[in-house]
Amino acid sequence: MVLTGRAVIDFLEGLGYNLPKNKEDLEAMITIADQFEIGPTWDRTFVGRLLPGRFCGSPVDTAYWISRSIFYPALIFANPATNPNGVKLINGSKSIIKPYIGKLMKPFGTDLVIVKPSKEERFVYPVLHTYNCHLLNFNKIARKHWGGIYTCANGIIPYETPSPFSIDVGVTDKVGAYYPDINPTVVAPIYAEKAGYSNVFSTNFSATVENLNRGVIMWIEIIHGGNTNNGSLGMWNPDSPYVHEPNPWRAYERPLLALKNLDEFIQFIPEYLERYGSSLPKVLYLLPRFLTKPIDIILDIVLVDRGCTEDPDVAVTNPDIGRLGLIFAVFSDAFPVDMRIKESKGLSLIPILGRRFRSYHDGIVITPLPGGENVLVKYNGLDFDDHLENLHSCGINAASCLISNTYLHLAFIRHGSVYQIIDPWSTSWYSSLWIQSIPRDLALGYTIGQAYERGMAMVGVEYLVNQWWWDLNENVVYFGDPDLRVWTPKNKYSDANHWEREDVNPLRWGKKDIYVDGHYLFGAKFYPHAYKPFDIKLIVITLIIIIAAILAISFYSRKVKGRKSRKGKK
């Protein structure tokens, strides 16, 4: 990649192109090719030295997509999301855990209480957020679990480093401006609001697709993804035995093997096997459920549920428990007990009472698959293609593994997405940093290509400017025009990405109508060379005149012949 990239830069500069190295003045480079013509490593190579962008798909796809990108300044106002009166969208619910009292409240039998139901609400200039896996207060709290803090590739320490920018005031719980923690479900909406957008949240498939069809300006998603079966995304599963909340505003963990969830686990086994092409007679599951039902009823009464939108991080992953970690890693979010506790280790080992001294927060909500499969279900590219209608020039910011250059990706393009930041390879947890920075940089007036490059500079390698970094799983690629300016409402930070409908009205040239060979350049009012159909009245009159003329000629010729015949007789 490095050798190829440097050779390309030398070649372009040899042709006379001026390619500044200053990050604020990087030139855009657009590639029009599908992945089997030029692989996506090509685009990722130039990040940091250029602003790369890609249009892919069939020739028809690229022509349509390029046209959409060129006319985006006007087309975005065809998006219902730009209606100043707002658009109705489905917003996710909020929930809390009320020990014991919650069992008597809806939904009955669980300590989970839905304090704000999912429902239609009106949003003005909305951005859609879907968080079906995410990091939570990673440097603030999870450092206790991992024994260290995350530092960005550009030297910034999230939550710790002061910021000189006023836009960063209020994104942490500290007084003043600090670069935000790795906490996308909170930080991204704050920045989106600062950019002038409103925020709508959904996690299940039906609500998410419906919101996209109704119209949003951008979709910010962190979802487990895969490249098999036309590309797939793990959406919140309302039909799971573990789930009592159909469409929470953000996903949360439900421990797979906790005693409280014994009955749910037995119900989940056949569903899990069916996903991977295996099945056993249902009677084999009905018998254990019948035998364990008395125990399960007692456990439901005595024990308390874990996991809600207020407290989503209730199960841990721990790589540092010796060789047993190879076994536990298979059920990475299954166990609600931290196996490696540094604080108050002695007290934490006391049965029952020791629970209050244990740290359950690892900062990772729903770890990589198979973690989270008890609350998620996969939807593939065909599912999205069948249910999507019009994306209305929506931009897609996706922190999902492996979904670039799949049929799922192509479906987004064909249904009208104007750009996608999307990964052909695996994506690490720290993608949360760049995804929460996108609305921040748009508010500050950067193009989407610049915002993408700034995000990569935080978390990954920039090969041609010698920025080397340990995290090799931050290689998302930008698809679209890097010079595109994503429309933002009015905000106090910059007006570079804001324009009014009147600014993109059809152009007029001069006071008089100007046309070339009968074609008006700026809207036709009349057509001087147009063919017009004959008036039926004119045709009738013409026929009458012709018939009258024929009759007159006939009458005259007979009269002349009569005179000649009379002269002959004389």
Image: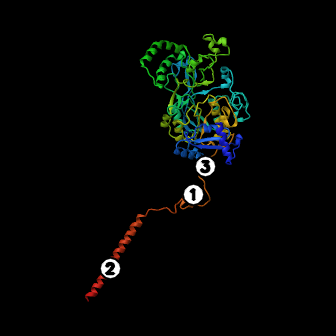
359 left or right of 212? right
Pinpoint residue 285: horizontal percent, then vertical percent.
45, 17
Within 10 Å of disc 2 (Cα), the crowding (few <14, some 14-19, many 20+) is few
Kindly check if marks 1 and 2 are in contact, taking CB atoms under 8 A apart as contact: no
Which residue is the extreme one toward the left?
A: 569
Report the Cα–Cα distance between label 3 and label 1: 17 Å
Of residue 370 and residue 35, the one placed in the foreground of this image is 35
> Based on the displayed image, in which of its 4 quarters is residue 460 positioned?
top right
> Based on the displayed image, in which of its 4 quarters is residue 180 positioned?
top right
Residue 504 numbered tag: 3
The mark nearer the N terminus, 1 or 2, is: 1
Residue 46 visible in the snapshot: no
Pinpoint residue 335: horizontal percent, then vertical percent.
57, 18
Pinpoint residue 434: horizontal percent, then vertical percent.
64, 33
Residue at 66% over, 37% down: 2
The figure's colour scheme reads rainbow
> Identity of the amino acid at label 1?
Leu
The residue pinned by badge 1 equals: 521
Asked which secondary structure carries label 3, the reply is helix
> Based on the displayed image, in which of its 4 quarters is residue 336 positioned?
top right
